[in-house]
Image (cartoon, rainbow, N blue to C red):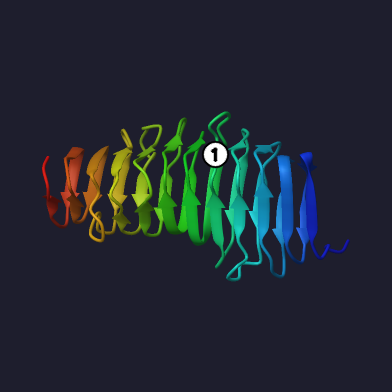
Amino acid sequence: SKALTLLSAGGSSVSLGSVTTSGQQDYAGTITLAGDLVSMVGGSIRLGGPVALAGNSSIVTAGFAGDDIRVTGAVDGAYALVADAGAGAVNLSGAVGASKALTLLSAGGSSVRLGSVTTIGQQDYAGAITLAGDLVSTVGGAIRLGGPVTLAGSSAIVTAGFAGDDIEIAGTVDGAHALVLDAGAGRIGVTGMVGGGRALTSVAAGAAALALRDVTTTGQQDYAGTLSLNGNLVSTVGG
């Protein structure tokens, strides 16, 4: 078999298995995906519509700058989804798993933009993350954010709350919005400063164990669990 140079498909509905191209892929309509979308040499992969997963799937570009992944609609289906753009950007602008939770989601790029995501299990993100909604794992699995986080709206990160259902943020967190972290019997670890660049409005975090550095908010801060603190907790306006 030989990869296509590019593929563009549009209709009221578009049903896809696996697609391999050397370049760009563009889809428009109500999309059903049951395989892997791969661009091997260079080019973005764009899905312009709601996506229903009908099998475990991945979306993978060649990974150079500009080799972006963009999904401009909701994503639903009880399957795993991996999105890997390398030095490109990943943008999931619609709600993921709101109607039917995914089993897991892994997304990596130079930047990763997220709204709300609901999975049954694990969530992993790598890159400079913009978060404008809630990340929720309903049955079991950690939620890991491997990069600096910018809040673009009030957000919550919530695991199922069993031992091992941890929340890990390997970077700073900034943005004039509220953040709630709830890991239940799991642990919470934030390796970077929170609010150091731009203060959050409030922070609430609860887990069996919490490891934090500096946290700056304009308002209230609440922590529940065994706290390991390597910095200062500062509320600048009131709370």
The quadrant of the picture occupied by the N terminus is: bottom right
Residue at position x 47%, y 30% in the image: 139
Residue at position x 69%, y 69% in the image: 42
Where residue 176 appears, x then y in whole percent?
28, 49
Where residue 54 appears, x then y in whole percent?
71, 36
Q: On the picture, is 227 further left or further right than 75? A: left
Q: Which image quadrant for residue 66?
A: bottom right
Residue at position x 33%, y 37% in the image: 183
Where residue 128 appears, x then y in whole percent?
43, 60
Q: Which residue is mark 1?
A: 96
**Residue flagged by tag 1: what amino acid is it?**
Val
Residue at position x 16%, y 40% in the image: 220
Depth check, front residue: 164 or 78: 78
Where residue 52 appears, x then y in whole percent?
67, 36
Q: Residue furthest right?
A: 1
User: Element type at marker 1?
Assistant: loop
Q: Which image quadrant for residue 214?
A: bottom left
